[in-house]
Image: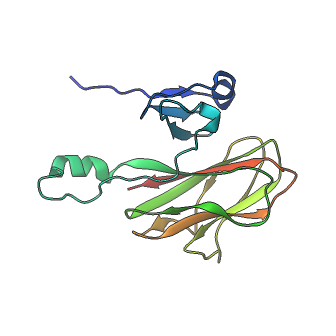
Amino acid sequence: MATRILLRRDTSANWASANTVLANGEIGYDTTLDRIKVGDGSTAWASLPFTTNVDIASNANAGLLSASDKAKLDGLHMPISFHIAGALAAGVQLPRFISPVACTLSTARAYAGGGSGVTYRLVKNGSTNGNTSATVGSAVVTTTLSTVTSLAVGDTLQVEIVSAGTSGADLSVTVSAAY
C-alpha cells in the first residue's frame, strides 16, 4: 500500500487571516502564490520566509541512493521561489538562488501584491541579455520561459525589476524547475 503525504495548504488570504504557527519542520503551501514555508514551531506564518532553495540528491552515491530512487528523483519538479517585499525599485534584487544541481526551467508564475504593471525578468549568472520579461499585477500570470531555460550546478538565478509600475508593494515569482 502506498503512503500518501498531504501538505497543509490554503490561500494567501486564509493563511494571512489565521497567521498559523507551523510545527518545527511542518510545510505550509500557499495555493495562491504556489509557494511553501517551513515552520520552526514558534514563528507565525506572516513572519516565516518563503523557501528559496532546493536541496535534493541528483546523483546516486554508492550505498546512499538506490538506482530506483534516483530514477524517481530525476523526474522531480520543485519550484524556485523569490519574494521581494517593500517598495519595488528597478534593478536586480535579492535573494539569489544558487543551483545545487542541474535543472531545466519551463515557466515562471508571478504576482504583484497590491499593484499593477510590474515588469520583471530573470537574471542568470548576472546576465540580462535577451531574457524574457513579463508584466504582472494583482492576478497570477504564468510565462513560458524562452531564454533562461536551464541551470548548471553553481549557476545563479535572480529577479530584475525592469519597471516597478504602480505597485509599491511586493513581487512573488515562482519558477518551475525539473531536476
Q: How is the image coloured?
A: rainbow
Please tell me which residue is depicted at 38% across the width and 53% down the height of the picture: 55
Q: Identify the residue at the far right of this view.
A: 166
Looking at the picture, tell me which residue is in the foreground, 143 or 136. Answer: 136
**Is residue 79 found left or right of 131 in the rendered image?**
left
Give the residue at x 34% y 52%: 56
Q: Is residue 32 visible?
A: no
Image vertical order of residue 78 relative to residue 23, above or below: below
**Which residue is most to the front?**
42
- The spot of residue 116 in percent (x, y) is 83, 48
Task: Tell me: residue 79, above or below residue 153.
Answer: above
The residue under the point 27% across, 26% down is 3
Quadrant in which the N terminus is drawn: top left
Q: Is residue 93 left or right of residue 67?
A: right
**Residue 167 percent coordinates (x, y):** 83, 50
Return the residue nearer the eye: 165 or 25: 25
Instruction: Name the quarter where the C terminus is drawn.
Output: bottom left
